[in-house]
Image (cartoon, rainbow, N blue to C red):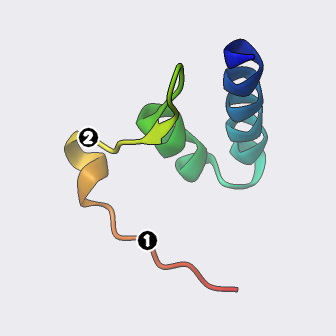
Amino acid sequence: MLKAVTARVRDAIGRLATGAPLLAAHLDRSTRTGLHCSYVPLGEDADILWNVRN
């Protein structure tokens, strides 16, 4: 099951690359999968401030 979750997360990030390549690259670097999934931005990625609008 862990492999399936990892594959789905990576697939979703890959699909984002078409419309939002910078976001996809950031998520690819900052998303950890395995026994636990987490979002952990490091280095310059940790300083990003997100502005999300509907």
Q: Residue at image x 44%, y 33%?
A: 29
Q: Is residue 30 left or right of residue 25?
A: left
Q: Secondary structure at mark 1?
A: loop
Give the class, few, some or many, for how many residues have Cα within 10 Å of label 1's Cα (few <14, many ≥20). Answer: few
Residue 12 is situated, as x and y percent measured from the top left of the image, at 75, 39
- Tell me if residue 29 comes above or below residue 20 in the rendering: above
Q: Which residue is more in the foreground, 20 or 12? A: 12
The relative height of residue 21 versus residue 37 in the rendered view (above or below) is: below
Q: Which mark is residue 42?
A: 2
Report the quarter where the N terminus lies.
top right
- Give the mark nearer the N terminus: 1 vs 2: 2
Residue at disc 2, secondary structure: loop
Closer to the camera, 51 or 6?
A: 6
Compared with residue 28, is residue 33 higher up or lower down, i.e. above or below?
A: above
Quadrant assignment for the C terminus: bottom right
Q: What's the residue at 52%, 42% (across, down)?
A: 27
Q: Is residue 42 left or right of residue 16?
A: left
Disc number at residue 34? Answer: none
| Residue type marked 1 | Trp
Picture coordinates of residue 47 (x, y %)? 24, 59
Q: Which mark is residue 50?
A: 1
